[in-house]
Image (cartoon, coloured by chain):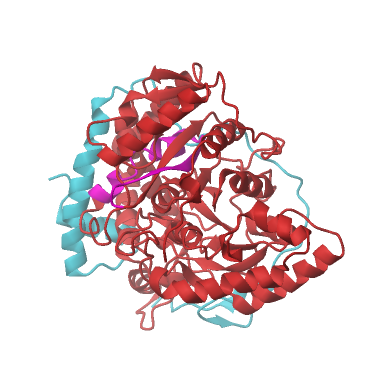
Chain colours: A red, B cyan
Amino acid sequence: MELFDLTIHELHDKLKKKEVSSVEATGAMLARIEATEARVNAFITVTATEALQAAAAADRRIAAGEMDILTGIPLALKDIFLTKGVKTTCGSKILADFIPPYDATSWLKLQERGAVLLGKLNQDEFAMGSSCEGSAYGATRNPWNLECIPGGSSGGSAAAIAARQATATLGTDTGGSIRQPASHCGCVGLKPTYGRVSRYGVIAYASSLDQVGPLTRDVTDAAIMLGAVAGHDPLDSTSVDRPVPDYTAGLRSDVKGMKIGLPKEYFIDGLDEDVKKALDLAIDAYRGLGAEFVELALPHTDYAVAAYYLIATAEASSNLARYDGVRFGHRTADAKGLADMYRQSRAEGFGAEVKRRIMLGTYALSSGYYDAYYLKAQKVRTLIMQDFLKAFEKVDVILTPVAPTPAFKIGEKTADPLQMYLSDIFTIPVNLAGTCAISVPAGMSRAGLPIGLQLIGKPFGEESIIRAAYAFEQASTWHQLQAEL
Amino acid sequence: MKITRKEVEHVALLARLQLDEAEINTFTGQMDAILAYVEKLNELDTAGIVPTSHAVPMENAFRTDEVRPSIGVANALANAPDRVEGFFRVPKVIE
């Protein structure tokens, strides 16, 4: 076992017993990044010097007996989180030189606990994508098979875990951007309930759907990270003011009597054979652990992708209006007047998928189409939320696949945006409903690619999905498998 | 056709995006396919359904109106592509 293989809780134990220092652990991580990064490309920026300084500070804190579970733990963040003084690009050329003047609340909270920042992770530009191919800084590769995508948009966050380049990472999830890459890279990914974690300092894509969450090696680490970043923030008026439970206290391997729902709309004919087999085995495992299964219907599932691509693009077209070349970001070199400067700066700075979504969202909100597209989608969103609320009258959690297939090949879906959008079919409904879900390693395809299972919880039901995920993890060995790199 | 080339050009104008010929052609085809797909929402009768703009029901989040520290002028201007004497500088607006 190398230092870079350890979980947060394992490394914490070693730091606490003074078997290893944070400088040593951080150094091991940086060496691992150095050794693997040319093949994986999980990072946009590596902050080696600052990381070693932060690690030294953490070691002083540990020596002084002021230790928290995250003190001295080397982490990395999706490049969507503002990090004061550290370049933040959001995967876009338009922010190529952007140095944030303040920190995202979630990063501030991790810093206060003494966490160490290794760098900023690759992503689809402005979190718009399902494959990490949409980054202006090159595609990230899946450590399990370098010809495959790691998933997206938090592809760098998942690949860095699978490549053991960071102990844990943070990502964001608007339509599956934490859970789908976690599934494809064989790590744990948790998307909290909307409002559970502050979005302050997280570059906005679709504000009514975006949520911050952890990608980790195991469920315990996900519980630790969630506990660290969750909570009300006066700087995010949509963050919810309710107590943050100790998510690790709920870790126990007991799901006896737990009612798990199986929605028939998620177990469709088009489901990949290996994914279906992994899910069937997982269901058997849960039965063995004493869980009860309830078949249920989420009848509006089939409409979620359509509703999502109207709502998310509409919000994006509004959010991305700020990139105008005036206050920050790229400005064109040869503008003929102000309006031309806006058009040229945006044309030069944005990539194809971002332009496509701005166009679609602008159209959906434009005069004469608003009712037919945007308003209609918001009404369908209500129906999707009601599906979940009805289902949760009967069950504690819902079990589904995360993605219809294991990771696909790089380049396979880039020419057809609609096919790319449909790869998020099982994750999108959770964002529309605003509730929480976790992806846990649950199998391997015959081609050697990880397969995750999704556990969906009630709004603010993170403790239940963590408990169910932990029970499965303890009864399986999938999370212990490592990509050879 | 759900969307014409002319409409795509108009939307690009609204979105302040300068698109070249190739982009207009590609986007017209792709947006047409996507809009044809989202058409399926019309299979659902949504009469009387209240639209959801936000997953968590929330009233206005008020706070006391008091002066608090901010990032300051120098920091606010630090990322500006062009600036002069504490201002953002932009190309001439009125010819």
The residue at the point 50 percent across, 55 percent down is A204
Image quadrant assignment for residue A266: top left
Residue A345 point in image, percent of width and height: 38, 73
Residue A458 point in image, percent of width and height: 54, 28
Q: Is residue A145 left or right of residue A466?
A: left
In this view, the residue in front, A265 or B12, is: A265
Q: Is residue A407 visible?
A: yes
Residue segment shown in magenta: A418-447
Image quadrant assignment for residue A134: bottom left
Q: Is residue A210 visible?
A: no
Residue A451 point in image, percent of width and height: 38, 45
Q: Is residue A328 magenta?
A: no
**If the image is split into quadrants, where does the N terminus of chain A sit?**
bottom right
Q: Is residue A55 left or right of residue A401?
A: right
In the displayed structure, would residue A433 be above or below residue A152? above
Image quadrant assignment for residue A50: bottom right
In the displayed structure, would residue A462 be above or below residue A410? above
Residue A230 point in image, percent of width and height: 65, 45
Q: How many marks?
A: 0
In this view, the residue in front, A381 or A61, is: A61
- Furthest toward the right, the residue is A64
In the displayed structure, would residue A425 be above or below residue A345? above
The residue at the point 62 percent across, 59 percent down is A104
Q: Is residue B71 left or right of residue A176?
A: right
In the displayed structure, would residue A318 be above or below residue A122? above
**If the image is split into quadrants, where does the C terminus of chain A sit?**
bottom left
The residue at the point 70 percent across, 72 percent down is A23
